Image (cartoon, rainbow, N blue to C red):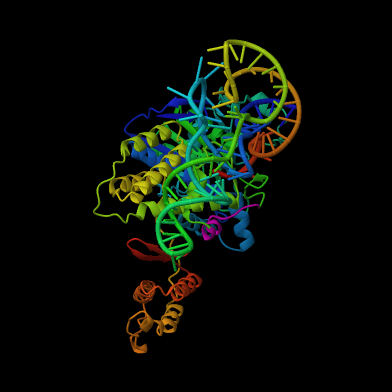
Amino acid sequence: MKVYNTLSAHKEEFLPQGDEVKMYVCGITPYDHSHIGHGMSYIVFDVIRRYLQFRGYKVKYVQNVTDVDDKIINRANQLGISSSELAEKYARGYFKDMADLNIAPADIYPRATQEIAKIIEVIQGLVNKGHAYAAQGSVYFRVRSKDDYGKLAHRSLKSMMAGARIEAGEEKEHPMDFVLWKAAKPGEPSWPSPWGEGRPGWHIECSAMSLKYLGETLDIHGGGQDLIFPHHENEIAQSESFTGQKPFVKYWLHNGLLQLGEEKMSKSLGNLITIQEALEMYHADAIRIFVLSSHYRSPLTFADEALEAAESGAERLRQTAHGGYASGAKQAKIDIKTYRDRFTEAMDDDFGTPQALATLFDLAREINRADEAGYEAKEARRALTELAEVLGLTLKERELPPLDVEPLRELLSSINKWRQLAGLKEIPLKETPDDVAALMELITATRSALRDKEQWQYADKIRSRLEEIGVTLEDTPKGTVWRRKR
RNA sequence: GGCGACGUAGCCAAGAGGAUAAGGCGGGGGUCUGCAAAACCCCUAUUCACCGGUUCGAAUCCGGUCGUCGCCUCCA
């Protein structure tokens, strides 16, 4: 397996330290709804994790929740609630978003506010080693104490200074020094520390948590490309300075960013579509196919046309996975291994999901072809479902609100008189069922009988009326099947 | 200003020196069907932004031009 490592800027052979892959992905700051840019990132790392498991690795996956930060505090103050209340609310929303996108939960979701002791321990260690210094109740990391600072972003301290927008660094020794511990301002949530009341800076929690839950060296650390600098650069500086161990992370993986129209989708620009909004419009499988049809390191632009295309593709895979009218027939000769190998080969090369998906579509075509020829392709269907699952595709029908019974009852009573025409008995009003399945059974049976009598105009009327109600009919060799219109 | 990525069919998007330039969507034609739907079959890039160069051979490597985007500041 090869993975692209941001640190080396090359693809490298993936060799984790042990059988259990230690994987850390930067989580969210819950002060607002998560948008589909977040969705993209977590879908990407979900697939990476699923694929590692598919390849036989155990994975320990940790994702932080930054539940204290300026934006949370400001927002909570605006709303007149506590910052922990606000953070909890949006963290819960985030977990629902993830579940709805079929993203498997992390093994641990540490919260910054629950890890203060470890955070203080790390800061204290950095101070003791001369990598950090206190000033006015805050503590800063001394970037000049780390000789390879900038190695992840591939920039030198000098080049960062040139043209960088740097504010006059009152308390800081060097403009690039960054805060580890922020002195409390009145009215802000704070914790006691050796430097006085305060709260953690943004970067330090990731160092503390990864150290606590995964150890001194992680196999994989992931996040969006926008986190490379300064966040991940600073994590490296903190962690390696604290432990004295290099590297902090063996493989740094970063996904490209989702764009909306001309610009990056981001909270600060306000041009965002929330995950729940996207899910109202599209099936989670469609969103995943949209994301996975381009390589994870490339930027991707959210466009309704592309999502619609993904929706149609998802529908085809779904139909294939659940199809199969030729049961009990001769087994189709489909070389499943070829498809598995193609899938694996694609994924082994830095998670080549576009080609992995292409393999799925090719397999689906061959299954349908076998179907068409009257062969049974159960094994191949199973393989399709299994490989789809590695990409986190459920291939399940979207859960729609239940059909209204009333329109179906009305339809049944209005076609009652046609039943005689079809050679069937009319159904007494009292015996009209009130559950969808039974109603549909009677309606389709009536229509089938009408078709047998070649009463096409009546049969077609039933079909178009059902379409209005939200039911699509398909007349297959094995009879009429119905499903919810999407 | 510095660093980096990208420009492939109507749209989305793989491919990274050599065999017919994946796949999805859309469109056209056909098979099946009473008609549909679904599915299947065929067609839809003689060419990879443009200009030069290296090479027996370039969409792929090098240089330049144009264009788009990201990071350098909170961000997945």
Most foreground residue, A5 or A383 = A383
Residue A10 percent across, percent down from the top left: 51, 25
Q: Quadrant of the N terminus of chain A?
A: top left
Above or below B12: residue A245 = above
Left/right placement of residue B43 relative to residue A59 reads right
Residue A103 counted in the magenta span: no
- Residue at 35%, 55% in the rendered image: A323
Residue A278 counted in the magenta span: yes
Residue A118 appearing in the image: no
What main secondary structure does the magenta stretch of the protein show?
helix
Above or below A388: residue A414 = below
Residue A306 appearing in the image: yes
Q: Quadrant of residue A436?
A: bottom left
Most foreground residue, A170 or A70 = A70
Residue A156 percent across, percent down from the top left: 63, 24
Most foreground residue, A83 or A63 = A63
Residue A201 percent across, percent down from the top left: 56, 42
- Residue at 48%, 48% in the rendered image: A288
- Residue at 50%, 58% in the rendered image: A93
Residue A407 percent across, percent down from the top left: 46, 79
- Number of numbered labels in the structure image: 0
Most foreground residue, A321 or A224 = A321
What range is drawn magenta here?
Answer: A271-281
Left/right placement of residue A260 relative to residue A237 reads right
